[in-house]
Image (cartoon, rainbow, N blue to C red):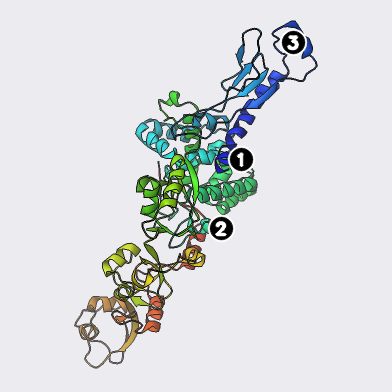
């Protein structure tokens, strides 16, 4: 059933592209093979049409197989086939127009182009950029092979222009692992807050902004929403890049001034000003690659991957081995699975190359070499040092730090989830629950934090003597208190100074020691502790989804 669904778009494409040919043929008189046949068929309606869709491919590189579409063999005159266009052939004897889906994805994409064209210097500048870097264009196109069929299928299913299938070239160079300087991530470059709005989960075990299926669904949902809001694809794209609020304000400003409100009329940042022209330049290159001396690689018009259900938690390395593919190829199709283990309750399916999907299921059913997952989740019952956690879970401190990316001089905060080995006391632990898989977070507090105290100066005290007493630098003490004095200058008796001293932020070697103090200190700290989830959301939302793009 999945494979039939995956090919449904081919039939849809054929119906759309072949419809005009069928209508034209239906208005034409049949081509009789003998006079009696002409008389017998005079009362029949126009030509029948059959749309042939390819059967499931036997290999990712194999072209789709197309049936001939011919009717019952005639014993009369030899058959005559008339070519109507590149995809439509008329069998004159059976009077059936067969619409053949294109074997190449680029042809299929060209048929669906439906956006108005831009023609300005920025478009030509981007065309020259790609023309002068054919290797870069080739790498991006090769990388897109794994994903572009699925994206085009989804665009056609929604009735959206296929120019949007080229947008990941602009966003991420078709790299689902891409992360921008503004923390936008994935093939479609979602900001954290926008990703959350469009149901892209981001937690310890997965980031759906990198997930091929989830991020594509969210991106097309968002683009459809923006197009409905602005009524123009160029403005929708500008809003995708700059933020819908900013585009709406720019339109309102121009309306107030009596100016135009199209994409080229608005005042916007340079990045957004170049954004739509970049997509237009890619459209022009795909439309006529020879004109730009660009050679696009062949991409077969059939699914590259299939979905496979996961019954249990499984190590990423084992999943790749059971599918007989490299770890790099597995991660390219499952980029959201960035940890050592995939949790079935949070990620119930994975993507595998078409032919490897069946092999994975076969090998999984026959696997008898122990548990599928050698890693699991462990939740810190209190704020602990890394050494204390390592002792509890039976791992070395260095391995625990490496697996969980724990920075030095940090404590693991209470309630944090860590990835640990599934051995010892945890050997018989079942699969991780859906609640943990969907909400797991890992947060830290500094082992030492700065605390501000007030100090009353004594008789004959100097900056140096006070600094020495609290083990700080005299120059730093002067800076904290806005004092323009030499280190040995006398201070006024009874004067109050502010001093920042290091205090313990939580337990270091003894579990549970001063947990409350550590948590309070971490809240006051402005050190290296990562921002909370809510703070990250506010920061991302404040950016209005504006983000710096990676230039392909």
Percent position of residue 250, x then y: 58, 49
Percent position of residue 52, x then y: 60, 28
The residue where tag 1 is placed is: 157
In the rendered view of the protein, which quadrant contains the N terminus?
A: top right
**Image quadrant of residue 118?**
top right
The residue where tag 3 is placed is: 37
Which of pointers 2 and 1 lies earlier in the amino acid sequence?
1
* 288 left or right of 235 in image: left
- Which one is closest to the eye, mark 2 or mark 1? 1
Q: Secondary structure at mark 3?
A: helix
Asked whether residue 370 is in view, the answer is yes
Q: Secondary structure at mark 1?
A: helix
Q: Closest to the observer: 460 or 444?
A: 444
Residue at x 56% of width, y 55% of height:
198
Q: Closest to the observer: 345 or 240?
A: 345
Above/below status of 507 relative to 540: below
Residue at x 44% of width, y 23% of height:
290
Q: CA distance from mark 2 to mark 1?
A: 23 Å
Q: Which mark is residue 197?
A: 2
Q: Closest to the observer: 329 or 285?
A: 329
Q: Secondary structure at mark 2?
A: helix
């Amino acid at each position: 059933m999945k494979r039939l669904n995956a090919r449904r778009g081919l039939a849809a494409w054929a119906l759309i592209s072949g419809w005009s040919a069928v209508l034209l043929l239906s208005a034409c008189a049949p081509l009789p093979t003998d006079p009696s046949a002409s008389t017998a068929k005079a009362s029949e309606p126009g030509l029948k049409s059959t749309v042939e869709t390819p059967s499931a491919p036997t290999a990712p590189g194999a072209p789709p197989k197309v049936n001939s579409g011919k009717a019952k063999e005639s014993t009369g005159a030899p058959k005559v086939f008339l070519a109507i266009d590149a995809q439509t052939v008329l069998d004159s004897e059976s009077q059936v127009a067969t619409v053949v889906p294109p074997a190449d994805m680029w042809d299929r994409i060209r048929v669906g182009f439906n956006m108005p064209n831009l023609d300005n210097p920025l478009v030509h500048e981007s065309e020259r950029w790609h023309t002068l870097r054919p290797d870069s264009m080739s790498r991006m196109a090769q990388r897109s092979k794994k994903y572009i069929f699925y994206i085009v299928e989804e665009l056609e299913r929604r009735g959206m222009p296929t120019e949007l299938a080229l947008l990941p070239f602009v966003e991420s160079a078709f790299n689902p692992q891409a992360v921008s300087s503004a923390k936008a991530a994935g093939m479609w470059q979602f900001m954290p807050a926008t990703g959350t709005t469009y149901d892209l989960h981001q937690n310890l075990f997965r980031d759906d902004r990198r997930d091929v299926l989830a991020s594509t669904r969210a991106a097309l949902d968002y683009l459809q929403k923006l197009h409905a809001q602005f009524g123009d694809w160029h403005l929708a794209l500008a809003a995708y890049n700059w933020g819908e609020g900013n585009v709406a304000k720019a339109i309102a400003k121009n309306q107030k001034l009596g100016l135009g409100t199209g994409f080229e009329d608005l005042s916007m940042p340079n990045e957004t000003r170049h954004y739509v022209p970049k997509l237009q330049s890619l459209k022009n290159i795909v439309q006529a690659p020879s004109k730009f001396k660009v050679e696009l690689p062949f991409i077969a018009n059939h699914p590259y991957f299939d979905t496979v259900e996961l019954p249990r938690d499984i190590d990423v390395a084992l999943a790749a081995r059971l599918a007989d593919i490299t770890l790099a190829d597995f991660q390219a199709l499952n980029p959201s699975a960035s940890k050592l283990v995939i949790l079935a309750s949070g990620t119930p399916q994975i993507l595998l190359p078409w032919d490897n999907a069946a092999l994975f299921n076969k090998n999984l059913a026959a696997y008898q070499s122990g548990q599928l997952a050698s890693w699991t989740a462990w939740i810190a019952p209190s704020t602990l040092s890394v050494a204390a956690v390592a002792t509890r879970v039976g791992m070395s401190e260095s391995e625990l730090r490496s697996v969980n990316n724990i920075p030095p001089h940090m404590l693991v905060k209470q309630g944090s989830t860590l990835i640990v080995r599934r051995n010892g006391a945890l050997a018989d632990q079942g699969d991780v629950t859906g609640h943990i898989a969907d909400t797991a977070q890992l947060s830290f507090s500094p082992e030492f934090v700065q605390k501000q105290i007030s100090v009353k100066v004594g008789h004959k005290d100097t900056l140096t003597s006070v600094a020495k007493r609290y083990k700080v630098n005299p120059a730093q003490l002067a800076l904290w208190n806005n004092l323009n004095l030499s280190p040995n200058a006398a201070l006024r008796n009874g004067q109050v100074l502010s001093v920042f001293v290091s205090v313990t932020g939580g337990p270091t070697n003894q579990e549970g020691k001063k947990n409350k103090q550590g948590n309070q200190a971490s809240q006051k700290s402005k050190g290296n502790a990562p921002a909370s989830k809510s703070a990250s959301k506010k920061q991302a939302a404040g950016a209005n989804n504006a983000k710096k793009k990676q230039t392909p």
